[in-house]
């Protein structure tokens, strides 16, 4: 919220214009500036690339993993009929929000050999390195 100047020499119009043009006000930011973070860990070791994606309260059938060219996409779309209409919910603390995550994967990783598993609400994906990109030792003649 912007600062209101309540001194006598400012008219209400001056205060309104001053507060409208202040840069620190969040009310006037466009929705595209918002970043919704989904809990994801991405790390790499000598064998390949790992993704740990939080999917709390979801089953492996509800989560979709797609590969198109060099793009890895993980998504979940909540359907309207997933909730029981006769169920009276007192509190809903586990958010089953839609998500659509995508990453461009470097060519040194082999997307055709991706492996995935889901346990305890955590989707684990592993993308191995291509054999050509693994470190090699060259003998000098």
Image (cartoon, rainbow, N blue to C red):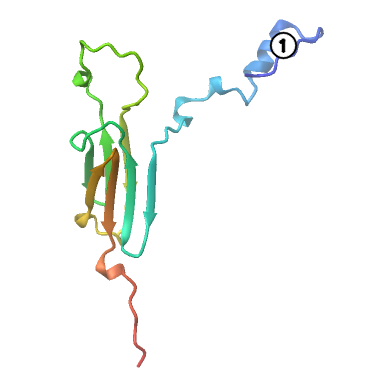
> Residue at 34% of width from left, 80% of height from top?
137
Does the rendering let one see residue 50? yes
Q: How many marks?
A: 1
Q: Is residue 124 above or below residue 44?
A: above
Residue 59 sits in which quadrant?
Answer: top left
Name the residue nearer the viewer: 132 or 16: 132
Q: Is residue 60 left or right of residue 32?
A: left
> Residue at 19% of width from left, 56% of height from top?
112
Percent of width and height locating residue 69: 23, 51
Name the residue nearer the viewer: 10 or 52: 52
Percent of width and height locating residue 130: 26, 64
Q: Is residue 59 above or below residue 22?
A: below
Does the rendering let one see residue 106? no
Percent of width and height locating residue 73: 27, 42
What is the residue that sits farthest to the right in this orientation?
9
Q: Is residue 84 left or right of residue 90?
A: left
Q: Residues within 10 Å of mark 1 (few under 14, many from 20)?
A: few
Percent of width and height locating residue 129: 29, 63
Q: Is residue 84 above or below residue 126?
A: above
Badge 1 is on which residue? Answer: 14
> Residue at 76% of width from left, 10% of height from top?
6
Name the secondary structure under disc 1.
helix
Name the residue nearer the viewer: 51 or 120: 120
Where is the N terminus found, in terms of image quarters?
top right
Q: Is residue 134 left or right of residue 10?
A: left
Residue 94 sits in which quadrant?
Answer: top left
């Amino acid at each position: 919220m912007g600062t209101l100047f309540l001194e006598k020499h400012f008219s209400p119009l001056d205060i309104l214009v001053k507060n409208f043009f202040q840069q620190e006000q969040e009310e006037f930011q466009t929705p595209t500036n918002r970043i919704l973070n989904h809990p994801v860990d991405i790390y790499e070791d000598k064998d390949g690339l790992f993704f740990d994606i939080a999917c709390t309260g979801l089953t492996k059938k509800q989560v979709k993993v797609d590969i198109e060219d060099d793009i890895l996409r993980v998504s979940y779309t909540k359907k309207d009929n997933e909730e029981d209409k006769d169920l009276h919910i007192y509190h809903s603390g586990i958010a089953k929000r839609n998500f659509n995550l995508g990453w461009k994967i470097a060519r040194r990783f082999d997307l055709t050999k991706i492996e995935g598993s889901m346990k305890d609400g955590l989707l684990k994906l592993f993308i191995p390195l291509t054999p050509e990109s693994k470190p090699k030792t060259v003998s000098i003649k």
